[in-house]
Image (tube, rainbow, N blue to C red):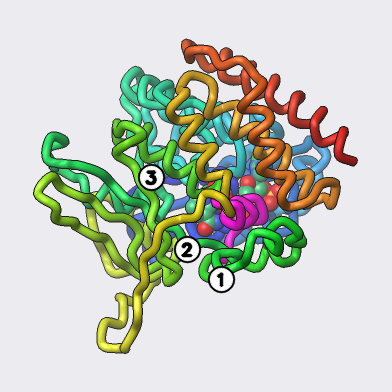
Amino acid sequence: MRHLAILGSTGSIGTATLAVVAAHPERLRVVALAAGRNRDLLKAQCEAYRPRCVSVSSQVDADWLRGELSYRPELHWGPEGLLACALHPDADTVVAAIVGSAGLASTEAALRGGRRVCLANKESLVVGGALMHEAALAGGGELLPVDSEHAALHQLLADRDPATIREVRITASGGPFRDWPLARIQAATVAEALNHPTWKMGPKITIDSATLMNKGLEVIEASVLFGLTPDQVAVTVHPQSQVHAMVGFHDGSYHLQACANDMKLPIQYCLLYPEKLPGPVPAYPWDQPATWTFEAPDLLRFPCLGLAFAALRAGGTAPAILNAANEVAVAAFLEGRIGFWDIQACNSEALAHLPVAPVGSLLQVLDADRAARSHAEGWVQTRT
Ligand SMILES: NC(=O)c1ccc[n+]([C@@H]2O[C@H](COP(=O)([O-])OP(=O)(O)OC[C@H]3O[C@@H](n4cnc5c(N)ncnc54)[C@H](OP(=O)(O)O)[C@@H]3O)[C@@H](O)[C@H]2O)c1
């Protein structure tokens, strides 16, 4: 039996995780739930799964929950609440499904605390880099990637001799603007950018998918997770989102991983690893005719992908700077303060102007994150 703390339980990954839990009640039990502001959904989740430990963003919402719930769990709030859930003594597995670098400290603490971390929060790997491996090594934690591409690579690379591997390729759906000409992309609206063709996700990652910054963050994530050089990670656009990753060997052959584009699959892979049990997702219907296509990404129309490769090559705090600027820019775009094309401009500007330092500690990356946020916010204000 695995005992779970789910951080970000009210989000797209959090609710998909609870669906996997519901499919395996004999294997998975919820011990802690943490969310942000969606207290009504969190209340319903608490009544359904009765976690012993619960956290929300504010004390006001924690007090509200205390009055509403039909039982009395430990109630916490804010960043300390996330840590209380991540390090709850009864939890052996943490699902890190908060969006953005707000998930960094709890991911690091869970790894240092010896937990299995099922990591959806790619931003914490992008920002924290090798520090996450160090935390796992120091505390005996285990890092398993929930991102479908990285869960695919985890399976493809298992027990492989690294010397045999030439490159890995992660696939990208191409997002809603894959076929659009540059001028139309530049003028895209929020509604158009939120209209993802194949995945239903939270708003931040959906915008990141429209700019291909999500794929860029995943390139950095793959490099950090699997110890690959920037030249060993590539992106292939595959609009059907059925092949999730490929490993290319020196002899010219490739191994591919394919499954339905449903996040419950990689979530279940991480939760139950190394077991592969029947779950809530049907197997791929191979007997139905289908066409799968593959093409190269266009870095002129999707410059954020190129920026991510540049940050990965620069190393040190560059990925943290890019990630922070992007979080500010995406929030500003969703609030209608800047245009779609301004996202890449803001990211490019932050990467070009902020100093990059080698990464020595978590405090140092948090400082780089703060400085980049403030710089990007200043840039956004010049546009509004
Ligand atoms: N969605 C996908 O298919 C997918 C696939 C691969 C990877 N990911 C990654 O998974 C992460 C989550 O994505 P998502 O799509 O699930 O996002 P989402 O739907 O926006 O959910 C985000 C979750 O984080 C919570 N949250 C946000 N800020 C918080 C804070 N400061 N303290 C506590 N809780 C906070 C939210 O709570 P409230 O809603 O209650 O405010 C919500 O539960 C992201 O890093 C994303 O890149 C997602």
Reading the chain from its start, which is encountered first: label 1 or label 2?
2
> Would you place residue 311 above or below residue 252 in this image?
above
Residue bearing the label numbered 3? 145
Q: Secondary structure at mark 2?
A: loop
Closer to the eye: label 1 or 3: 1
Residue at x 65% of width, y 68% of height: 195
State the residue in front, 369 or 140.
Answer: 369
Residue at x 42% of width, y 38% of height: 221
Residue bearing the label numbered 1? 197
Q: Main secondary structure of the magenta part?
A: helix
Disc 3 residue type (three-letter):
Pro
- Left or right for 171, reference 55: left
Which residue of the protein is positioned furthest toward the right in this rendering?
Answer: 384
- Left or right for 116, reference 50: left
One can see residue 269 in this view: yes
Reading the chain from its start, which is encountered first: label 2 or label 3?
3
Residue at x 70% of width, y 64% of height: 184
Reading the chain from its start, which is encountered first: label 1 or label 3?
3
> Would you place residue 353 above or below residue 256 in this image?
above
- Reply yes or no: does residue 210 show up in magenta: yes
- Reply yes or no: does residue 45 show up in magenta: no
